[in-house]
Amino acid sequence: MKNFIKPAIVLTFGMAILIAIYTVITFGLGKILPNKGLGEKISQHGKTYYANIGQEFKSAKYFHGRPSAVDYNAEGSGGSNKGPNNPEYLQTVKKRIETLKTENPEMQNVEVPEELVTASGSGLDPDISVKGAEYQVKRIAKNRNLEEGRIQDLIDKNTYKPFFGPSKVNVLKLNLALDELK
């Protein structure tokens, strides 16, 4: 038993030191980045928004983001923990697909982008795919009396390519840019 106590204590203290060093490095890097690790704030017309937290848009005049399992509550971030074979989850996704097709009648025969009907792991994902944004163009053009091309241009201008992964569109930024169109 004595043979195991010393290595366990050394390992515990060694890991504590590594975790402390990692925490200091991560915190320090966050403080030298552009927003000092505080998230991206956007101010428009006297209101301040956080672009890195998903927000709900219900109006037909706006792009809709991913559904949230936590009702977009940043204090209670998390997913539903229901797997793809869970009957309740499948029913929820089916209802979301039906709602989305009802809201976008011109897109009845187009495949629904999965992020528009499934919540992210945090429930607060602020981005959708370009395909998810393009799926909503016809509805927004109709409700705002705009040409689809203008809305597509707006999507193109607000699309960004992260270092890893596919191109994305931030829903809040896209909707704020949409409000600025005359």
Image: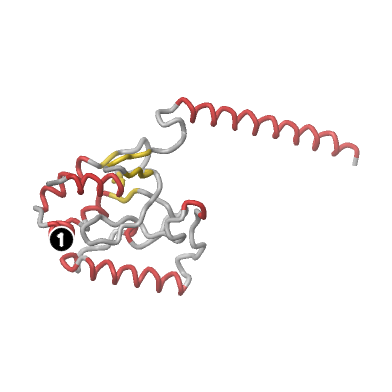
Which residue is painted at 18% across and 44% down in the image? 180
Count of numbered circles in the view = 1
Residue placed furthest toward the front: 46
Q: Position of residue 49 (x, y in %)?
A: 36, 44
Q: Nearer the viewer, residue 84 or 28?
A: 28
Q: Nearer the viewer, residue 43 or 70?
A: 43
Which residue is painted at 56% across and 27% down in the image? 25
Q: Position of residue 23 (x, y in %)?
A: 59, 32
Which residue is painted at 90% across and 42% down in the image? 1
Q: Quadrant of residue 40?
A: top left
Three-letter code, disc 1: Asn
Q: Nearer the viewer, residue 68 or 117?
A: 68
What colour scheme governs how the chains and residues are painted in the rendered image of this protein? secondary structure
Q: Position of residue 99 (x, y in %)?
A: 29, 70
Please state if 102 lies on the left or on the right of 33 as rendered: left
Secondary structure at numbered mark 1: helix
State whether residue 44 is above or below residue 146: above
Which residue is painted at 32% across and 59% down in the image? 116
Q: Position of residue 70 (x, y in %)?
A: 46, 60
Please state if 61 lies on the left or on the right of 6 as rendered: left
Please state if 55 lies on the left or on the right of 179 as rendered: right
Residue that badge 1 annotates = 143
